[in-house]
Image (tube, rainbow, N blue to C red):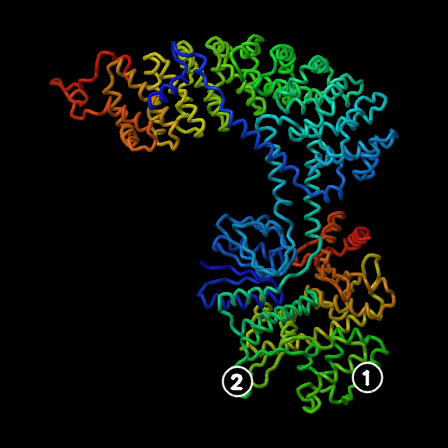
Amino acid sequence: PVMSEHSERMKKFKNRGKDAAALRRQRVEVNIELRKAKKDEQILKRRSISIAAMEKSPSPGEDKNPVIPLSLGEIVEAVNGSNAELQLQATQATRKMLSRQKDPPLNQIIELGIIPRLVEFLTHADNAPLQFEAAWALTNIASGTSEHTRAVVEGGAIPAFISLLSSPHMHISEQAVWALGNIAGDGPPYRDALINCNVIPPLLALVSPVTPVGFLRNITWTLSNLCRNKNPYPPLDAVRKLLPVLICLLEHEDKEIISDSCWALSYLTDGSNDRIQIVVDTGILPRLVELMGSPQLIVMTPALRAVGNVVTGTDEQTQAAIDAGVLAVLPLLLRHSKPSIQKEAAWTLSNIAAGPCQQIQQLITCGLLPPLVELLAKGDFKAQKEAVWAVANFTTGGTVEQVVELVQSGVLKPLLNLLLAKDSKTILVVLDSISNLFLAAEKLGETERLCLMVEELGGLEKIEALQTHENNMVYRAALSIIEKYFSGEENPDLQPGTDQDGLYNFSVEKQDFDF
Amino acid sequence: QRVLLLVASDVDALCACKILQALFQCDHVQYTLVPVSGWQELETAFLEHKDQFKYFVFINCGANVDLLEILQPEEDTFFFVCDSHRPINVVNVYNETQIKLLVKQEDDLDVPAYDDIFRDEEDEEEDSENESDGSEPSDKRRRFEEVFMEVKLFFSSFRREILFDYEQYEYHGTSSAMVMFDLAWIMSKDLNDMLWWAIVGLTDQWVQDKITQMKYVTDIGILQRHVSRHNHRNEDEENSLSIDCMRIAFEYDLRLALYQHWSLYESLCNTSYTSANLKLWSVQGQKRLQEFLADMGLPLKQVKQKFNAMDIALKENLREMIEESANKFGMKDLRVQTFSIHFGFKNKFLASDIVYATASLMESIEKEGPETTNFIKALDSLSRGNLDKLHQGLDLAKKQLRAIQQTVASCICTNLVISQGPFLYCSLMEGTPDVKLFSKPVSLCLLSKYLLKSFVCSTKNKRCKLLPLVMAAPMDVEQGTVIMVGIPPETESSDKKNFFGRAFEKAADSTNSRTLHNHFDMSIIELKTEDRSKFLDALISLLS
């Protein structure tokens, strides 16, 4: 079983002649989930304020004409009645309740059964205030859980909102954009339902040079939600329609618009190679790489993620990213003060290192080895883990000369130190890298020399200690290295003895590749 | 580790200090004592000593401001704060590392929840950081009533409102001497002397009108249990009193100031309660006093001579007799629950006697020696070995009470108390007799309270009876400053909460008046005489 698991792991390396598609590691899904959960928690937290206080001190932004508080019963009556004045009052009262910070009564409003009426109000083109209030109220209901969103969709809101996109009143079409964003954000089924209802053309029509920035931000976010989520991915023809506009928005000067556009591209590249190819074909990579170097975290993060996704693709796709200059930006990001950026950058680097040796050579030429070694030595632990993967991929796919260069960059010491990591997975990858180094050393006939270096750096001690590791695979891998390279203390071949001239007998011909 | 004791100038603080000193002595803790009369002195004392000390004890000062903010202590410096001033600054309450508050567990501080005043702030920081930290955008967004900036504004106004409600009124918590005694008791180191100081501390709060009648009675009850625990043995052997023993006893005694060390007549005239109720500043009032004495059947000659020398037979049922007559004259509360102390055979004092004597020593205007002389003298007078100082204090106290009574009478007779709309106002002129005495905060407060009581009894204007009083007296003629104090209305159900601290602050801010909030009570300020009228105008419009 050990061997099969080992080969399972080996499959994850991008290596010559092996299953290339499986080599690049896709992002770990869990991280995103956690990130999302944290965000939700914060939004909930933000609501922690008492209703009493809310009502006591109206906010500065409050409209001039005060809304008469209505009971839920009165609201139902008014909404279902035919008096337009009362309809508006009741809808506005509903919207206000749904807009307050704490405990918006989503469930209660849904239970009133007024959603179909509110949807109907969306169609009252002669009564813009009513349309607006209804749109806002429905937006907020759709912002809740999937169940809440479903209540809105099942009330028939999708076609109504899509036609509102073309409303002559900008604030109404903006509210429709927002509502549709919430519906699309619920997940693939509603996202695709919107796409099938032809949401894209009228939505894209709203993007123009004169669209106000605030409105454009809403549009961009909604577009990004149309690109979001997998299983299944958004339909390819929809993606093809969205991409040109996203490319355009990526040139906007507002950083939030750029950020959300980058996120959209990161969703689109977070998939199979043919989906990556569609993005690469737009020629956007140079711009994305440029944005990776942005001082704005909200821009840098999604840009890095999108490019990181691209280099999980084919060698050609990776090459496109290299040609776009990714290797020039990565050193900065590997040294970034934020651990999450370090980690993401190291992950990207590890996938480039999984490429053919030409790409590894470019990586060396662009000076990636020093920041890699630095990160390995003193980066954030999660970033170190990614850096270890980079070393493993590098030593797997690199030529002997390239491996020698890696060792000369000082990789051995921090690599061996990571044998003390708590995480068995990381230890295994380190041991793998060490094995790869020995393979290279064997080819050069420098095994003894490497042995000595490992021993001098305290590595032997650590590897020996791992023979008592509780994880069976770790123990096997450590044992295998010890047996192969350190077992024969009696073995004269491995004893650094001297010959008659007093020269060390392991200093062999290939001085060029001196470790 | 040596400890620095910073002690405010009030009797309760002195009593707490005495208890702590005794505890320190027990445990061989070395300390340095620095009296501080206000914020300026406190800051100076801290700056002077912060390098030599790591532990600072604040007695009746420090709780109601953000100590870390104003003193900027090093991280290894610790503040122990035993202060009856309320509300306690929220930062002091929630700082868990450098500030240790000594508060009785039962004291309800009514502090706003941590989350309401601090967490939002952190959340907002998180949120705004979140906005720029590059995390993935939310998949759904609710549209709030306000845009984000306004939400922030709203939060800060919400927080301000909570803090405003909390900080609006000044009041006093349990006496620091009682808190300190509790500490001694918990450590099983409480002595009868300490108990007496706790009693004096509580009585000071009552004399200075700092706590409600309810709180006073409750705390008396607590102390009474300690008193019987400590003094039961002596009761069995009444005759075993020796010269150096002391005995504390619960009393239901007359609230006549210093009467056992004065003449009954003088005490009746100079006690706020009787003087105000009988309206002694008027001719009718004097007549009423005669009638009152006649009703009791006490010969004027006896009443006017020293209480000690009064006929023993008369003294026997004196308290009951006086109470009975007082009831007829509408003075239903002439007797109060209190404690007395016996030193040896002949020295007997009521707790309030000690309060008056000590307070007078502390604010004595007879200049002698350095500024701390008064403080040391007052502190010493609390030790039973220093009867001479105590008697000196009693004499000063009598002078002070007479001065207060005369000033009250003249203020009322010359209509110096005027209604300003939201409050009553009275200003003592330079040149008024004894005016120098009232440049001191405790004396001025006492005068204000007596004046307000008397005014309420004298006026027929029902609205005026419910008003608070602002009183001003010349402070430093050369510097052209006045001292001003605001006190809450004199009503029976008064909660003794004082809003003048905040009001003074605002009035000063809005008029750029040159004021100094130097006192630990925020409702006492100093200001430039020239700025007084604009300050008052602002105060009036603020409170209207």
Q: Circle 2 — which element?
A: loop
Where does residue B16 sit, x and y in percent of width and height?
57, 66
Give the label on residue B243, or none.
2
A99 vs B368: above or below: above
* The N terminus of chain B lies in quadrant: bottom left
- On the image, the x and y values in percent for residue A217 come to 68, 22
Residue B156 in the image, given as x and y percentages of width and height: 68, 41
Q: Position of residue B313 (x, y in %)?
A: 69, 91
Is residue B521 placed above or below B451 in the rendered structure?
above
Front residue (pair B377, B154): B154
Tell me which chain the residue with mark 2 is part of.
Answer: B
Instruction: Name the residue at 43% across, 30% down.
Output: A381
Residues at marks 1 and 2, CA–CA distance in whole angstroms: 40 Å
The residue drawn where x is 22% and y is 11% is A509
Residue B145 showing in the rendered view = no
Q: Quarter-wise, where is residue B429 in the image? A: bottom right
- Please give the name of the residue rendered at 54% of the width and 68% of the height, measured from the top-left corner: B18
Classify residue B413 as left or right of residue A286. Answer: right
Residue situated in front as seen by the camera: A94 or A251: A94
Q: Which residue is mark 1?
A: B290
Amino acid residing under circle 1: Gln
Q: Nearer the viewer, residue B475 or A196?
A: A196
Give the numbered dot on residue B485. Answer: none
What residue is shown at x 54% (from left), y 88% (from top)? B239
